Amino acid sequence: MDHIDREILQILQQNARTSLKTIAEKTFLSSPAVSARIEKLEKDSIITGYQAQINPMKLGYHILAFINLNVAPEDKQKFYQYAEPIPNILECSSVTGEYSVIMKVAFESTMQLDTFLGQLQKFGKTSTQIVYATHVGPRGVQVREKSGH
């Protein structure tokens, strides 16, 4: 991956709908060359997908929360199978520390969140933080050259 690939990644992270023509103009390449580079970045699993960023509040999801859950190691696979199809779970990650899993969730009401928490507690102890405001929103990672390269 060279500096042009990194520039393409920065552009696409800012707006995945940026046209090939615009990317080509910014990188001083032809549109087919940009297309080929993007295809290679996808093939190499550097670009893993494209999605629209949606405001959950506008769709009625007024409660965003982070839920910490302590799942016993032997129950993790069963938990992940339970969690996978639940659309209210926006992200679910294994983490270090007192809890083994952290989830970002969205619900229409605190009552729905409370019902979900009750279901989760069959897997272990929970700790929940409700989001009041997000001051630094979701964004891509900084694409820079690896040190030593």
Image: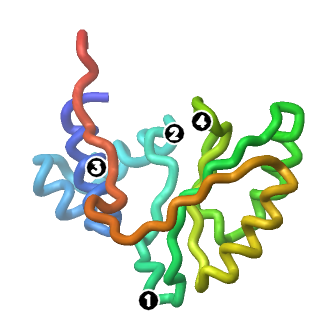
Q: How far is disc 2 from disc 3 in space, using C-alphas?
A: 17 Å
Q: Please say if the residues under marks 4 and 1 sit with CB atoms less than 8 Å apart.
A: no
Label 2 or label 4, whichever comes before in sequence order: 2
- Identify the residue at horizontal 68%, vertical 82% (top origin): 111
What is the secondary structure assignment of the residue under circle 2? loop
Amino acid type, mark 2:
Ser
Height in image: 122 above or below 97?
below
Label 2 or label 3, whichever comes before in sequence order: 3
**Mark 3 or 1, which is nearer the eye?**
1
What is the secondary structure assignment of the residue under circle 1? helix
Amino acid type, mark 3:
Val
Q: How far is disc 2 from disc 4 in space, using C-alphas?
A: 23 Å
For the N terminus, which image quadrant? top left
Q: Which residue is mark 1?
A: 58
**Mark 2 or 3, which is nearer the eye?**
2
Residue 113 image point, x, y percent: 66, 74
Q: Nearer the viewer, residue 102 or 5?
A: 102
Height in image: 137 above or below 6?
below
Q: Which residue is mark 4?
A: 95
Label 3 or label 1, whichever comes before in sequence order: 3
Height in image: 24 above or below 64?
above
Mark 1 nearby-residue class (10 Å; few <14, some 14–19, many ≥20): few
Q: Which residue is mark 3?
A: 34
- Identify the residue at horizontal 80%, vertical 47% (top origin): 124
